[in-house]
Image (cartoon, rainbow, N blue to C red):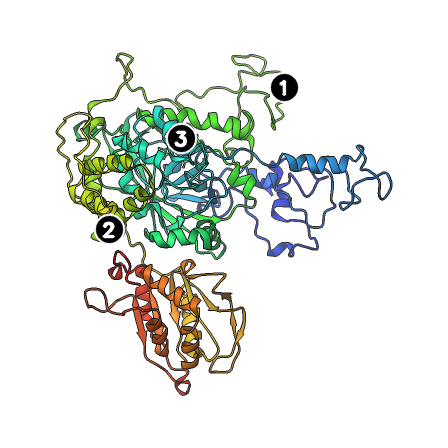
Amino acid sequence: QALAKAMPANPLKPAEHGLANGHTPQAGPCQPAPDEIVRSSTVNEDTASPKTGDGSVRPGFNPTNGPLDRMRVDSGGQALTTNHGVPVGDNQNSLKAGLRGPTLLEDFILREKITHFDHERIPERVVHARGSAAHGYFECTEALTEHTTAAPFAETGKRTPVFVRFSTVAGERGSIDTARDVRGFAVKFYTDQGNWDLVGNNIPVFFIQDAMKFPDLVHALKPEPHHQMPQASSAHDTFWDFVSLMPESAHMLMWVMSDRAIPRSYRTMQGFGVHTFRLVNAAGESVFCKFHWTPVAGTHSLVWDEAAKLGGADPDYHRRDLWEAIESGNFPEWELGVQIFSDVQAEGFSFDVLDPTKLVPEELVPLRTVGRMVLNRNPDNFFAETEQVAFCTAHVVPGIDFSNDPLLQGRIHSYVDTQLTRLGGPNFHEIPINASVAQVHNNQRDGLHRQAIHRGRVNYEPNSLGGGCPFQTGKAGFVSFPQPVAEDKVRGKPEKFADHYSQATLFWKSQTPVEQAHIVGAYRFELTRVQTPAVRERVLSVLANVDTELATRVAEGLGMPVPPPQPKALPIDVKPEVEKSPALSLLSRPGEAGIKGRRVALLVADGVEDVRLRTVHKVLAAAGAAPRFVGVRLGVVTPLSQEPLHVEVSLEAAPSVTWDAVVLPDGEQAALSLAEQGQVVEFVKDQYRHCKPMLVLGHASAIVAKAGIDVQLPDGGQDPGIVLGEPMDAAAAGAEVNVEGFFAALAKHRHYERETDPPRV
Ligand code: HDE
């Protein structure tokens, strides 16, 4: 009630601009009854901090705001109108001079509809155009007041609403999700001290050290200008030409060629703030800080062959995965860790903390977990929210400040600037998804698409006519950390920036053999696509500085000798503190090792032994996985029990790459008929090649044999990812099913032990 009173709801327009409507939509023919509808604003029971004992709310809950509810429109039960509220009698026919005559200019209804349609598109983001987003909250699990006054870290248990957008970088808005690419990981915190945007990536370092090089990097990466190819791919000449001439990219390239660049899901990737930031406490003292998001579900990736095939099978693979996980209540969650270190500590490091091509090894500065983030609500409208959200590194709140990282400094300018074109003017902060939940009061006025109706005659400061309001807050507001600066103006870089290889080598050495093999494979693929031999050779000359074995293996894959190492920028001798950092291996974070959200195909055909199969389906679903009966065609199959079994999805609609695991059924007739299907054999081969778990029940071993799969590992051992079940005849139906082995295999996600290059199957 208090909230509703605070909102500028217009009782004459119940379906719009009204919080009341947001919570209790009008009953209408296409809507469920109001009590079945759960509507939530940006700040609601889920995202707000829990209430304290006396019923009052903790900081983080701002009762004066619910910006998204205020703007929501639900048209159930409403009459169709023009944009100016005029009821429309006929939405099918334009106004004509006679039934077969010309359309009249006077038809304002037609013209308004077409004109609006003509202008529906806005420019896509110049990078990170392809993205998906969700709402949720950040919860502080350990107050960080000794280091920062930033609102989200003010109190243990405090919740701050967030909106998070994940993205690829290179591809256009409609491009595939599974391209080999960096992923954006941008978080907007709607704090009670204003919006804080932590605009990060899923890789903790970057290609370049200075904002000056960013347009060149992006030009080289994007489709080549003469023929606009390739889409969403770095596997082409201009990209490798550029990076081979910019050895500062050597470290980042190792990450991009690793499985980090083909995540299984947005839910299973890490996020990083990349730059060194500053935290500032109430006493005005500052420490450096690096931000890390770690997925509770563990870090998991695709394999390249799978990622490439997924591009065709489901271009929306990551978008769908995020959406479905949230809709099914399997809320993605990350822990926020910080690495905190002093200026003095930073001075002593072998690398410069202002260099964004370097990370701070966790062995040097351990991670401290200070919060968790849960995404629990899908957007209502893709354009209004995911497309119009405007992240900006300049959006910081008191207690968080910038370092002098030259890449970060350039970003502070770029993001606001790009929104001016993309969102059409200086008032994009008023678009509901961008509006802060903290009150906005200043003397900025007018401009295109102004929403606020400022009252009074005072739009300047100092003033006496407005009582001096709005007034500045002094130390209670944002105060920049007064870092002393007194040097000559120069264009250049500090000496430590010239070490381009130590951390690339560290990354390579920290990978498991499986991960190393994937890195070699990725370089080989990308450089095979490169047409200019001199560019390939130059890349190899860079790799020769990273690690001889790496350079040799990539060169072998290209049928080339390893050239001499590229001359170094400066002959400096770096003594890295850490030679190996297990935390850099993707496989070092298995997560909670559950099977929640895993998509499991249970193949079916006439004659399938279904009692056991139905039990497997049931226990998988109960454990939070997403099992489906998959057949050659939709419809019903007749299993051994004779009780009709409904095919939920067909093989052609959901090929192998869209599943995390497969259950091959028992029942002799079914197994033999499935083994005769080309699509089935191809499906099983891909499951095997992509190292996925397989539960093979009884006679289904015929399918495995037909696919040419050897259940022994290349070294002769038993493949732990292939779980075999004894044959079972119909008479024994009803017996208990032991799926524990399969669950364990599924929780492990991939069974790389079976992988060979080239693949055996
Ligand atoms: Fe961005 N970047 N960037 N970037 N960036 C943009 O802003 C830019 C960089 C990142 O989901 C643009 O609104 C410059 C690093 C993400 O909406 C643009 C430089 C990191 C997103 C821009 C960088 C990022 C962007 C394009 C070098 C990881 C998507 C549209 C100085 C820490 C945010 C837009 C979303 C988007 C500029 C480098 C992350 C043009 C100039 C390093 C996640 O402003």
Under circle 1, the secondary element is loop
Residue position for label 2: 517
User: Which of the marked residues, 1 or 2, is nearer the chain's N terminus?
Assistant: 1
Q: Position of residue 256 (x, y in %)?
A: 31, 42
Q: Position of residue 739 (x, y in %)?
A: 34, 72
Q: CA distance from mark 1 to mark 2?
A: 68 Å
Badge 1 amino acid: Gly
Q: Position of residue 638 (x, y in %)?
A: 51, 79
Q: CA distance from mark 3 to mark 1?
A: 48 Å
Badge 3 amino acid: His
Q: Going by the image, does 233 lie left or right of 86?
A: left
Residue position for label 3: 219
Give the class, few, some or many, for how many residues have Cα within 10 Å of label 2's Cα (few <14, many ≥20): some
> Mark 3 or 1, which is nearer the eye?
3
> Residue at (73%, 44%) from the top-left corner?
80
Answer yes or no: disc 2 within 8 Å of ligand 1: no
